[in-house]
Amino acid sequence: MRNRMLLLGAIAILVAAPAMAFHDGGVANCQGCHTMHNSQGGAAMNKSADGLSAGLAVGHGYTDLLLYPNASDVCLNCHGRAAGGGYNVWMDTPTNPSLGDYYSAGNFTFLKEDNINDGHGGATSAILGDQSGHNMASGIKGTGWDPVLTAPPSDGSGPLDNNNIYCSSCHDPHGNSSFRMLYRQGQQVDIGGDTVTYAATMEAVGIGTSDTETNSLHNAYYSGYSEWCASCHTGFHNGAGNLIHPSGVALSATVIAKYNAYNGTTDCVGNPGPPCGTGVAATAYLATVPFEDPDDTTYTTTSTVGPSAASKVACVTCHRAHATSAKDSGRWDFQVTLLHEDGEESGAWALPNPYDVDQRSLCNKCHSQDEFDELPSTLP
């Protein structure tokens, strides 16, 4: 069950055989991404940076015999267009995304936002969309690599000293048996001249790429998520001794009890604990704040149960993999006081709020610090 791909991750277009996906869990139709001689019937096969017309003269090709100027644009030819054959990771309109295409990794469309700052003074102190997630250089989408962070956020000791990433920096374009074709433990990839060796295999099963994520339909993460991310983001995984939030470690009994009881700020304030709230373990799962759990018989894509003693906090608990309309790929906006304030000052798309207008940060799902707060809707 683990490592099973449901509808495939990176470039999914259909070929002649009915219902056969382009990658099909392995090496795909080579000419879907490559051209050997850049010639067919006297016409050039390569595409220009905008993906619309022939980019090079017959007989001249791009690096690695690609059809497009870089690896990301090869992927985005299908996965960045409304009429693409698979999961659209780069929608056209960042202010009106389709939830089916937003979940569960987020969407790179938010890199194009002019402001995602909804904190105090957010309307006059803009945070550009290039801080919304992993920056991709794309001719088709007109974006470049991170203009500020020249290396991944880390402690400086990681293997990657640049941010020159493509889709193929994380996903194996030639296919493997991993979740969403992410690189497996031991696989190596060259990123801007640096070699990254992936430290883990991410084990998970996913919902369909056209499904909308809900509390009863969601990805199920089993193991390896934080360790996989640590292949580049080493400094975030050096432990709480450095006053860093733990990741890839088991949840404490206290946190488990809080997660299972918590059912939003209003419920928490009205039903003080400890822990606060009227939630029960059987229906405690919140897709916006997921966790890892190795039990693939109980923890499935349709389970609603909260965490157990074997469950872990992971990078995916607070972040999505691609980008969101919040800073740092946040699953919720870390900079607002109340979730309904998201989008009010910046005009950016408001991340879905799973609770009501009084809801505070979803950090409270595990930490429930809002137990004795006032409910803003009751204030004069």
Image (cartoon, helix red, strand yellow):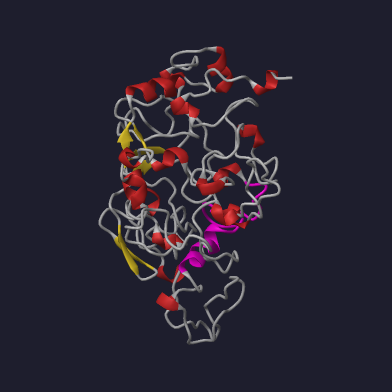
Relative to 339, is 193 above or below?
A: below
Relative to 151, is 55 above or below?
A: below
Relative to 341, is 256 above or below?
A: above
> Residue most toward the front?
242
Q: Is residue 283 magenta?
A: no
Q: Can residue 106 be seen in the rendering of this structure?
A: no
> Residue most toward the left?
186
Q: Which residue is depicted at the point 38% across and 47% down?
A: 5
Q: Position of residue 216 (x, y in %)?
A: 48, 29
Q: Does 123 sit left or right of 203 as displayed?
A: right
* Part of the protein shown in magenta: 71-97
Front-most of residues 180 and 265: 265
Q: Position of residue 344 (x, y in %)?
A: 70, 40
Q: Position of residue 105 (x, y in %)?
A: 48, 47
Front-most of residues 310 and 164: 164
Relative to 47, is 73 above or below?
A: above
Dominant secondary structure, magenta: loop
Front-most of residues 88 and 36: 88
Q: Which residue is depicted at the point 46% across and 13% down?
A: 273
Q: Is residue 93 magenta?
A: yes
Tally the marks. 0
Q: Which residue is depicted at the point 68% across and 43% down?
A: 121
Q: Position of residue 368 (x, y in %)?
A: 48, 24
Q: Can residue 60 be seen in the rendering of this structure?
A: yes
> Residue most toward the right?
380
Q: Does 32 sit left or right of 81 as displayed?
A: left
Q: Quadrant of residue 260?
A: top left
Q: Which residue is depicted at the point 51% across and 59% down?
A: 135
Q: Quadrant of residue 175?
A: bottom left
Image quadrant where one finds the C terminus: top right
Image quadrant where one finds the N terminus: top left
